[in-house]
């Protein structure tokens, strides 16, 4: 399962993907903007809060790896409803930045696994497979 997620995250950082519908809003960034495999996964209010907290921790970590100009472009893309991967893919990131951001997203993904039930994890896995088949 982790290998597929890593492949999805890596490819997502390199290619554009369409805007994804949101599950819940966190200020200006939704859960599914950061974690597209959560689309359609029914979360309890507690799980939503936990993942929302994770989102609010993850975005600043990603933003801290960007230059001031990249941060401005990244925030503008998020405000337009674009996913994190789409926003990041348009920034002309260095290889080091891509790897750092990928690491942050992988860590966040691992933390999500501890929040989800086994059934929800299976749904996420199906979503990952569907996203991979769509070339996202």
Image (cartoon, grey):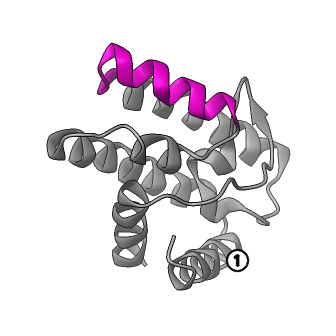
Viewer-proximal residue, 68 or 59? 68
Query: Is residue 46 toward the left or the right of residue 50 in the image?
Result: right
- The residue indicated by pointer 1 is 119
| Residue under the image location 69 percent in, 34 percent down | 80
Numbered marks: total:
1
Q: Position of residue 106 (x, y in %)?
A: 37, 54
- Is residue 11 positioned above or below 67 on the image? below
**Secondary structure of residue under mark 1:** helix
Q: Position of residue 67 (x, y in %)?
A: 29, 19
State the extent of the magenta-drawn residues as a range.
64-80
Quadrant in the picture for residue 123: bottom right
Q: Position of residue 122 (x, y in %)?
A: 63, 79
| Residue under the image location 38 percent in, 54 percent down | 13
> What is the crowding at mark 1: few (fewer than 14 residues within 10 Å), some, or many (at least 20)?
few
- Is residue 49 positioned above or below 33 on the image? above
| Residue under the image location 23 percent in, 39 percent down | 97
Residue, far left: 96
Question: Does 28 lie within the magenta span?
Answer: no
Viewer-proximal residue, 78 or 33? 78
Query: Is residue 66 toward the left or the right of residue 26 in the image?
Result: left
Q: Position of residue 100 (x, y in %)?
A: 24, 41
Viewer-proximal residue, 80 or 1? 80
| Residue under the image location 56 percent in, 36 percent down | 54
Quadrant in the picture for residue 64: top left
- Is residue 82 positioned above or below 14 on the image? above
Question: Does 67 lie within the magenta span?
Answer: yes
Residue, far top: 68
Quarter of the picture containing the N terminus is bottom left
Magenta segment's dominant SS is helix
């Amino acid at each position: 399962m982790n290998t597929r997620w890593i492949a999805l995250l890596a490819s997502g950082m390199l290619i554009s993907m369409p805007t994804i519908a949101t599950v819940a809003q966190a200020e200006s960034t939704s859960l599914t903007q950061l974690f597209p495999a959560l689309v359609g996964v029914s979360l309890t209010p507690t799980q939503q809060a936990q993942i929302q907290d994770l989102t609010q921790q993850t975005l600043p970590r990603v933003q801290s790896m960007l230059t001031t100009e990249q941060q401005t472009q990244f925030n503008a893309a998020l405000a337009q409803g674009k996913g994190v991967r789409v926003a990041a893919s348009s920034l002309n990131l260095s290889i080091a930045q891509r790897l750092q951001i990928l690491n942050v997203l992988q860590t966040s993904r691992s933390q999500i696994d501890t929040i989800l039930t086994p059934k929800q994890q299976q749904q996420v896995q199906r979503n990952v497979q569907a996203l991979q088949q769509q070339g996202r």
